[in-house]
Amino acid sequence: MVFPPGHLQQVEHVNAPANRRQRRGLVLSVCATVLVCAIGFTVWSLTKSGPRNGNGCISFGFMTVIGGSSDTACGAKARNLCLATVPKLVKDGDYYLEMHRACRRAGFQSSADTELSSS
């Protein structure tokens, strides 16, 4: 596309703030917008946590080989998961530890509790 002579100067003149006061106002408004977005995101992330235990559900995070993961179960699935026996040779010990903690927080009976009481 061919532009007429002086087009760049006209575009820069129209788009650029004319003086120092306008530039400062533009910078302050951009900074204020970024600050408001950062504060809003921080507040949202602090108040929005993952699924909570209770109401027939369990939710827990656990360590894995490549980082971390989480699991959630509700209703009969949660009760069965809490009552499942822990294998004697446990590869994923953190999974079962966190699962039984979540079961206790949700008020479910845990197989870890029954194993401890029978020993």
Image (spheres, rainbow, N blue to C red):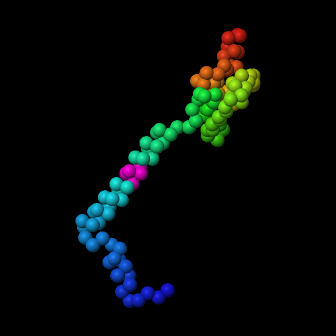
Residue 84 figure quarter = top right
The magenta segment: 34-38
What is the x, y in percent for residue 103?
63, 24
Was residue 37 drawn as part of the magenta stretch in this picture? Answer: yes
Where does the image place residue 25, in percent across and percent down from the top left? 28, 62
Q: Is residue 89 magenta?
A: no
Majority SS type along the magenta span? helix
Closest to the observer, 71 or 97:
71
Q: Is residue 94 visible?
A: no
The residue that appears at 74% across and 22% down in the rendered structure is 85
Vertical side of 102 occupied by 36: above or below: below
Q: Is residue 70 left or right of residue 3?
A: right
Instruction: Specify whether 67 is left or right of 7.
Output: right
* Quadrant of res 63: top right
Look at the image and tell me in which quarter the C terminus lies.
Answer: top right
- Image point (71%, 22%), residue name: 83
Q: Residue at x 58, y 35 (%)?
A: 51
Lateral position of residue 19 relative to residue 104, left or right: left
Count the labels in the image.
0
Can you say whether 44 is above or below 82 in the image? below
